[in-house]
Image (cartoon, rainbow, N blue to C red):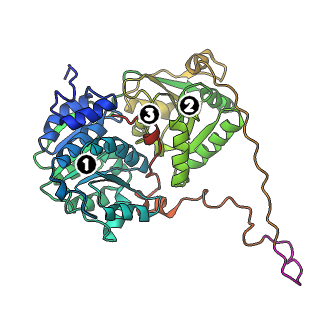
């Protein structure tokens, strides 16, 4: 489809056209142009497109349009939502809800999110008060179903977003159980970059007479995205990463492990480049706080594991750095997709040690990325040109001294040998380990990457 169409030309209802225009959105992206005619007419649709292609609006518009036309008396019954969106991570669930809310408000529809890592009581109370659309991670949603906090029998339109990532995380069994509880006659919209790992089985089982629309191949990448591979000796790697993080614009640095992310963010901050981390060992409040700081521009550097590779959208991320080459090509594509979004340009750098050359080149071939490695150090011209102007040095805040709590003396007795009292163990408490909600099926995914971000509230959501 060569010519751009407006939402009005695609027969999007007037209240939604006005809501979109108020957010500066008048012309539809390709995935929206291709799918809206079918989704608005009630057809089951399978949409294929890479991250950042505009899938969220592609399913949000028909969901709100369908439910908004219902008789008000049939909406918002306690524990019986009419619309359901399943997402693999808390970050993505919150981003989706940020897109849905202003559209739903145009019809006085109410939305809520359900995911692990936070207390279930707030979510249960929201369901009791009545919601029209639920955006949920599978594990926590199934928990609440088992607790009889809600029923999916009234769901008229179901969306499965990032279906391939659901499969990668091992969610297909619980997703299957959830879909079985929705009305078989309801409308279903599946969006996925690929149809491997069992996604095709979900399509065959739950979509009826579906229409398939594909914007691009799963390995395609944005034309405005420039890829670089910097080969560096191990002794020079730390200085190179520091230099790549030192620019004035937003950048995301991806590491393989939670420990690396935490350590690198701390090191950069101590070296005068304020950074926050994002990984599965953080509590929900810590994730929200760090993403809000990054999304609002207070902090320009986010150091993250693959928990941020999908579902985190912040405008104007100019650089993505793979501090270590990812394990497989799909992770490379999704990490890289955090930049060059919504028509903006961006750069992607892979930092590679000499011994990683063969594996890195194989990974890039699978991702259909053609780039020649350059040998560099932190002072190389290629690095300086990419980084551009560097941010001012920010003196790290002094650390408050840790005060050891002295054991209480009982009246008429002597100290018990100087051991710590019950309240004075000196530990930080609570933030270093993975919460039960994030580390089990209760949290929305087995390994705790399921998550929600505050960035959707502080930055303009992606289409």
Whether 263 is drawn above or below 226: the answer is below
Residue at 25%, 65% (x, y): give it: 151
Looking at the image, is mark 2 or mark 3 nearer the viewer? 3
Q: Disc 3 and disc 1: Cα gap in Å?
A: 23 Å
Quickly name the residue at label 1.
Answer: 159
Locate residue 283: give its quadrant: bottom right
Quickly name the residue at label 2.
Answer: 352
Which corner quadrant holds the C terminus? top left
Q: Residue 116: image x %, image y %?
A: 43, 59
* Lower position in the chain sequence, tag 3 or tag 1: 1
Residue 414 drawn in magenta = yes
CB-based contact (under 8 Å), mark 2 and mark 1: no
Residue 162 drawn in magenta = no
Does the rendering let one see residue 315?
A: yes
Q: Please state if 216 lies on the left or on the right of 156 as rendered.
A: right
Does the rendering let one see residue 49?
A: no
Q: Nearer the viewer, residue 188 or 295?
A: 295
Crowding at dot 2, Cα within 10 Å, few <14 / some 14-19 / many 20+, comes out as many
Whether 386 is drawn above or below 128: the answer is above
Q: Disc 2 and disc 3: Cα gap in Å?
A: 20 Å
Q: Please state if 49 lies on the left or on the right of 337 as rendered.
A: left
Quickly name the residue at label 3.
Answer: 338
Q: Disc 2 and disc 1: Cα gap in Å?
A: 39 Å
Which corner quadrant holds the N terminus? top left
Q: Please state if 398 lies on the left or on the right of 355 as rendered.
A: right
Crowding at dot 1, Cα within 10 Å, few <14 / some 14-19 / many 20+, comes out as many
Residue at 14%, 35% (x, y): give it: 37
Whether 130 is drawn above or below 374: the answer is below
């Amino acid at each position: 489809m060569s010519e751009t169409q407006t939402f009005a030309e695609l027969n999007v209802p007037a209240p939604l056209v006005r809501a979109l225009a108020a957010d500066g959105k008048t012309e539809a992206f390709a995935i929206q142009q291709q799918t809206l005619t079918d989704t608005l007419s009630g057809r089951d649709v399978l949409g294929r497109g890479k991250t950042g292609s505009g899938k969220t609006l592609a399913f949000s518009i028909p969901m709100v349009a369908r439910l908004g036309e219902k008789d008000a008396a049939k909406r918002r019954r306690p524990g019986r939502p009419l619309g359901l969106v399943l997402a693999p991570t808390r970050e993505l669930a919150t981003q989706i809800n940020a897109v849905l809310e202003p559209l739903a408000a145009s019809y006085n529809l109410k939305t809520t999110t359900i995911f692990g890592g936070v207390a279930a009581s707030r979510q249960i109370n929201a369901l009791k008060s009545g919601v029209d659309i639920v955006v949920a991670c599978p594990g926590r949603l199934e928990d609440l179903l088992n607790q009889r906090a809600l029923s999916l029998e009234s769901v008229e339109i179901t969306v499965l977003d990032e279906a391939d990532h659901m499969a990668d995380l091992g969610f297909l069994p619980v997703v299957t159980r959830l879909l079985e509880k929705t009305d078989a006659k309801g409308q279903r919209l599946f969006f996925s970059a690929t149809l491997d790992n069992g996604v095709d089985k979900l399509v065959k089982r739950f979509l009826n007479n579906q229409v398939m629309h594909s914007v691009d191949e799963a390995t395609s990448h944005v034309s405005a995205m420039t890829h670089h591979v910097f080969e560096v000796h191990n002794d020079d790697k730390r200085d190179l990463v520091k230099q790549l993080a030192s620019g004035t614009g937003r950048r995301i640095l991806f590491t393989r492990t939670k420990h690396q992310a935490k350590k690198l963010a701390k090191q950069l901050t101590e070296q005068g480049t304020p950074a926050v981390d994002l990984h599965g060992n953080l509590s929900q409040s810590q994730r929200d706080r760090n993403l809000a700081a990054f999304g609002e521009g207070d902090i320009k550097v986010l150091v993250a594991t693959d928990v941020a590779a999908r579902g985190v959208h912040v405008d104007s991320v100019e650089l993505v750095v793979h501090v270590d080459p990812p394990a497989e090509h799909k992770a490379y594509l999704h990490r890289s997709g955090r930049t060059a979004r919504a028509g903006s340009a961006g750069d992607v750098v892979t930092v590679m040690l000499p011994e990683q050359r063969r594996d890195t080149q194989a990974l890039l071939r699978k991702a259909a990325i053609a780039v020649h490695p350059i040998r560099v150090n932190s002072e190389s011209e290629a690095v300086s040109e990419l980084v551009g102007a560097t941010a001012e040095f920010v003196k790290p805040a002094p650390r408050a001294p840790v005060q050891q709590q002295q054991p209480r003396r009982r009246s008429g007795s002597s100290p018990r040998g100087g051991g710590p009292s019950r309240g004075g163990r000196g530990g930080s408490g609570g933030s270093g380990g993975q919460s039960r909600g994030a580390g089990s099926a209760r949290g929305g995914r087995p390994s705790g990457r399921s998550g929600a971000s505050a960035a959707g509230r502080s930055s303009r959501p992606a289409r």
